[in-house]
Amino acid sequence: MFSSRAHDIHKDLSALEAAAASARSGFACIFSTSDEYERALIAHRRAEGRYDGPRDWQGLMLAGCILMLTGALLVML
């Protein structure tokens, strides 16, 4: 009777250890540091095209000013 009970305890202990190992693996992260995560995130976003080159805002502003001045001059004439 003792060996049967010991076998059951060993079986239960093994099942408990397997469940604990499975639970720990669910919390695993593929990144070892937050810097590594940030680099991967930025690389992914660049691949999506989220970080396009700088826009030529100065050129757009100049074109807008020229259009406004042209419109003002046409109204004055």
Image (spheres, rainbow, N blue to C red):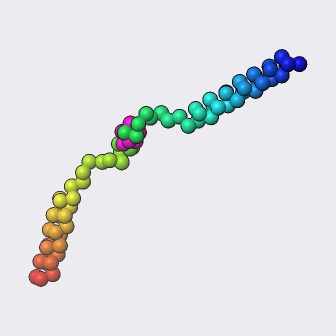
The residue lying furthest to the right in this view is 1
Q: Is residue 3 above or below residue 22?
A: above
Tally of numbered tags = 0
Q: In the image, 53: left or right of 23?
A: left
Give percent across and percent down for residue 14. 71, 24
Q: Which residues are magenta?
A: 36-42
* Predominant SS along the magenta part: helix
- Quarter holding residue 27: top right
Residue 71 in the image, given as x and y percentages of width and height: 17, 75
Q: Which image quarter: residue 47?
A: top left
From what the image shows, is residue 51 above or below residue 76?
A: above
- What residue is at 40 percent from the left and 40 percent from the top? 34
Q: Judge from the rendering whether residue 65 lies leftward or rightward of residue 55; answer left or right.
A: left
Nearest the camera: 1 or 65? 1
Q: Is residue 54 visible?
A: yes
Extreme-top residue of the structure: 3
Q: From the image, which quarter does the C terminus lie in?
A: bottom left
Residue at the far front in the pictured view? 2
Depth check, front residue: 61 or 12: 12
On the image, which quarter does residue 24 sit in? top right
Q: Is residue 41 magenta?
A: yes
